[in-house]
């Protein structure tokens, strides 16, 4: 089984410092849905791993999160793609959970659920916490410049971590994966 894990906000859809709080605010990044469809057709199991502290902060509720994911699924279906599973951390940054990125909890759970060694799993994110979670879980990290990616790329350069592949967006990362 080929499993690929994607962060959501900033990788699949536009991100906001004010949080994405509703299905109306959830808007896909150009080319992201088509990129996921290419992964689907390439035989990949596509999984989302996303911090959703807006739940703990009271910015939105589980019904709003479900509506966002339903919108994403419907839009993906129209272009021939699908998300096979969505994992999210509902906790705030000070809650001390094991699932909130940069901790590897969500990725470890994905590895167990799909019975795949994480060393064979690619995790595409747009933040340092995504990269750290991938490294902690021993997954392969990739960074996209969308969302918070440009800022994360600069931090990686200052920390001499230039071994992480960086792409303009999800579409270009997927093109490299499918080669």
Image (tube, rainbow, N blue to C red):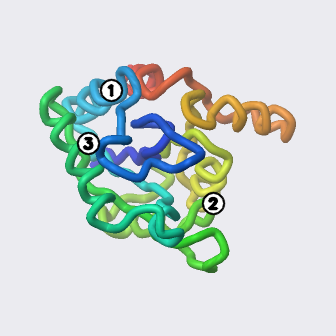
Label 2 with label 3: CB-CB less than 8 Å: no
Q: Is residue 104 left or right of residue 30?
A: right
| Vertical comparison of 51 with 159: above or below | below
Instruction: Find residue 72 and report its image quarter.
Output: top left
Assign the C terminus to one quadrant of the image.
Answer: top left
Relative depth, front residue between 89 and 81: 89
Which of label 2 and label 3 is nearer to you? 3
Total marks placed: 3
- Mark 2 secondary-structure assignment: loop
Q: Residue at x 63, y 60 (%)?
A: 102
| Vertical comparison of 39 with 31: above or below | below
Q: Give the alpha-carbon distance from disc 2 to disc 3, as whole Å.
A: 24 Å
Where is residue 110? Give x, y as percent: 38, 63
Q: Give the alpha-carbon distance from disc 1 to disc 2, as whole Å.
A: 25 Å
Where is residue 19? Give x, y as percent: 51, 50
Where is residue 95? Give x, y as percent: 61, 79
Work out whether residue 107 can be spotted: no
Near mark 1 (Cα within 10 A), the count class, few <14, some 14-19 or many ≥20, is: many
- Mark 3 secondary-structure assignment: helix
Q: Residue at x 32, y 64 (%)?
A: 115
The residue that label 2 is drawn on is 102
Q: Is residue 81 left or right of residue 176?
A: left
| Vertical comparison of 39 with 168: above or below | below
The residue that label 3 is drawn on is 72
Q: Give the alpha-carbon distance from disc 3 to disc 1, as whole Å.
A: 13 Å
Q: Residue at x 29, y 50 (%)?
A: 68
Instruction: Find residue 39 and report its image quarter.
Output: top left
- Mark 1 secondary-structure assignment: helix
Work out whether residue 157 can be spotted: yes
The residue that label 1 is drawn on is 35
Dot placed on the residue nearer the N-terminal end, 3 or 1? 1
Q: Residue at x 16, y 40 (%)?
A: 74
């Amino acid at each position: 089984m080929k499993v690929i894990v994607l962060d959501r906000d900033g990788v699949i859809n536009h991100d906001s410092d004010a949080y994405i709080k509703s299905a109306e605010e959830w808007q896909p990044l150009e080319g992201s849905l088509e990129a996921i469809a290419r992964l689907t057709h390439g035989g990949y199991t596509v999984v989302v791993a996303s911090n959703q502290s807006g739940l703990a902060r009271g910015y939105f509720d589980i019904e709003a999160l479900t509506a966002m994911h339903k919108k994403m699924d419907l839009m993906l279906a129209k272009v021939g793609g699908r998300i096979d599973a969505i994992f999210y951390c509902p906790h705030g940054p000070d809650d001390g959970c094991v699932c909130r990125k940069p901790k590897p909890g969500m990725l470890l759970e994905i590895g167990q659920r799909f019975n795949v060694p994480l060393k064979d799993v690619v995790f595409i994110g747009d933040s340092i916490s995504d990269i750290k979670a991938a490294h902690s879980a021993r997954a392969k990290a990739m960074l996209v410049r969308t969302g918070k990616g440009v800022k994360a790329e600069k931090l990686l350069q200052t920390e001499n971590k230039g071994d992480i592949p960086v792409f303009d967006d999800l579409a270009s990362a997927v093109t490299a994966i499918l080669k």
